[in-house]
Image (tube, rainbow, N blue to C red):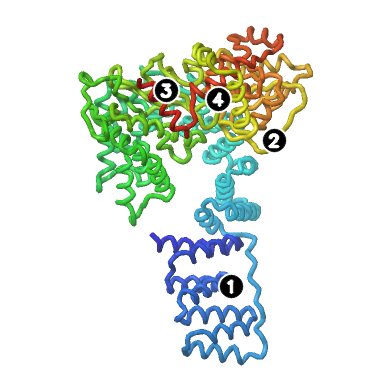
Amino acid sequence: MLSIQRHLIVKAIFLLSKIGAHRASLACTDKLLQLNVSLSQLRQAVASAHAREDHETALRFSTYAIEKFPSNSFGYLEKAKILATLGETEEAVEILRIAPACGPVSDALRSYQSHSKPAAKKTVKKPQARVASHDLEQSLLMAGNDASWLGIIAEQAEQAIKADPSNPTNFNILARTYHQLNLHVKLIEAITSFPDSISSRLNYQLMLAKAYQASRNHLAAYDTLIAAQIEHPAERKLLMRISDMLRDDAQTARAYSYLCASQALYPSYGSVKRLSFEIDHALFDHARKTLLSILEFPQEALMKFMPMINRATPFFPDLEKSTQAARASARELLSAETGRKGINPDDQIKVAVKCRWINEAHGIVKRNRGGKQPVSRDNMAWLDTVTTQISRIRPLVEMATTNELSSHLYGLKNGSIVDIDPNTIDPLKTVEVFIPTVFFAAPNEEKPSYATVREFLGNVYDYLMSRRDLTLVPRHQWNWRNCDPRIPNARIVSYHTNAPYNSNHLHIQEVPLAGRCSMDHQGFAGYSSLATVHTPIEDVSASISENMLAENEKVLHHTYVQNNVSKYSQTINRVSYDDDYVFVALQIPTDTVAALAYITGAELVKSVAEHYLGTNTKVRVKRHPYCNSMTVQKTLDALLQAEAIEISDASVHDLISGAKAVFTVNSGVGLEALLHSRPVIVTGECDYAYATSAQPKSIDELKTILNNDFSFDPARTRKLLHYYVNGYSMASNDAKGIHEKLSSWLT
């Protein structure tokens, strides 16, 4: 493997030199010299440098040869030859005087000493303006994520296109380079400037649509895909991409029709993607039929799609035996040392980690080390990260894996494995512990809040494992929104779930106040008991002094407002507004809590903007960073054109700070606005409803509220904030507080 790496780096050095990327070439030279290079490889590298008349690289290699092999004359002779070529004869003689004595060294010394004049200094050739497409292609393959190298390739590709516009390869290289650099605007400009015969090709249309999406122009992306679909009506990639865009816009029926069409063209992956869609949209009758058809797939296909199949299994407990058999078959296939797997080792690793089979994942790395297809560094790094993240809960993970493969359950008590008999156990001393995806997320799936959740759950699991009177039954939580308990009346701990109120069930979820998670018996955010039942706030606050309530509010204001801390990272470029305005914080319309909206975000911003249009009050709007909704974009575009709103990417704290009121459906920004002592109007269920100014349930109610003065209740806000951080949520690193909460729950 190391020799292949050396070969690729040497090749990269001279390709870079050929296209004029000298700095990148020298960087690759440094990388090569960090490896354990042999003398024969140095000879080859120097010879190649001479062939390219790349004196600088040849000099670096020859100097390294002297340092690495001081008793061999090769490095001294080569360095002296280069110095003499560059006109530095005296320096060449000095190098040879310290070289090991031998015939070639003596001959070279006499030759250089006999010259009465220094040799004329040769200049390095400038790179040609035009570079062969083959060389650019090779350079792009080797550039990786090196921005400087990629930038040079883009410049060379542009020159090549101007010199030979009939060569389609150069267009392809330019587009791929911009795509790799994430220069979305440049990519859009490039593809739209290509000749129609080039830009109309499917790969460019897909690339163009993706660039529009990355630039948050979802309407242009959709139009691009639809136009391409007319030209390529039976292309499954287009059908799936269109379906995804319609899904993100909450156009469920249309999205489903496109997805079903793609399934007809690609039955295996299309079926699994359809299953995922059906369970996410509660189409359970359809999902059952789809799952049953998938379970008939060949073993290799089942193994490949097992992570997606797992997401559906909590909704169909009656199919438990069939899904467990499929899971066992997939695991057996991955574990086998030999035999056809159906996918390459990198994809095998992905399946193993997503299925939480960590031992099998390490086995895949081991058996492919040194082979034709070793596991990539990125995937090995992912596996190492996951292994570290679960190190403190490894016994729970391994036991959960056993339980998901068996119809019989096993538990852990005092560190020992025990059989679980539902007829004899004490359900109040038995806890089904559901382990979520946050511990196994792929790097591209990682979110800022996951570290908080892992730390919080780690403290929860530590305490539960320390209790000698408890029997823990570890389970894998395959689905973000649902878990499937198998022990009647037992206690349950799960993440990001909601269900009818049950005092034996703890639902854990990160809250809008960064670094904290809530524990509730009904759910999270608008699904939590705190959204509608406010007596605990009143009961606890009755025994808390006004000074303590005020001090708690002051601490929270300093922690979050003054330090510009929010759930999502905020811009460090602070802004101060001194004009009259209201702030509308938008959300993802397909988010879980969006189902709790009485008035959607698009309806809300339209109503507020229309109310203030033509007045001295401005309407400032911030779109959610993950919102891909075309409806939201269309609404905002129309309001912008009418000069009814301003869209801002400023910190939410800056936008809240100067606003006379904050409007949102049920975003966590509403809670943050209470820290600023601002009136908050919500149009959905939320866990801070106790202190909001209003909660209209129709557009008519909203209009009535807009026509009246906004009120802010400081006393209710202080009570809510105190309960929110002392009873409802805890800091993820507050092990003592988390343990006390769990102890109270288990008493």
Which residue sits at x=41%, y=46%? 379
Left/right of residue 528 with respect to residue 683 in the rendered view = left
Which type of secondary structure does the marked residue at label 1 adopt? Answer: helix
Say which residue label 2 marks. Answer: 574
Q: Label 2 sits on what residue type?
A: Arg
Mark 1–mark 3 contact, CB under 8 Å?
Answer: no
Q: Is residue 176 above or below residue 81?
A: above
Label 4 with label 1: CB-CB less than 8 Å: no
Q: Name the residue tied to disc 4.
A: 588
Residue 471 locus on image (x, y percent): 28, 27
**102 shown above or below 539:** below
* Residue 279 appearing in the image: no
Secondary structure of residue under mark 4: loop
- Disc 3 vs disc 2: Cβ atoms closer than 8 Å? no
Separation of residues labelled 2 and 4 (CA atoms): 25 Å
**Which of label 1 and label 3 is nearer to you?**
3
Q: Tell me: 353 left or right of 713.
A: left
Q: Which of labels 4 and 1 is toward the front? A: 4
Kindly report the distance in space between the C-alpha atoms of the residues bearing marks 3 and 4.
Answer: 22 Å
Give the quarter of the image for residue 90: bottom right
Name above or below for residue 169 compared with residue 256.
below
**Residue 507: image tag:** 3
User: Which residue is label 1 attached to?
Assistant: 55
Q: Marks 2 and 4: which is nearer the front? A: 2
**Marked residue nearer the N-terminal end (3 or 2):** 3
Instruction: Please name the residue shown 52% across and 90% down the image.
Output: 107
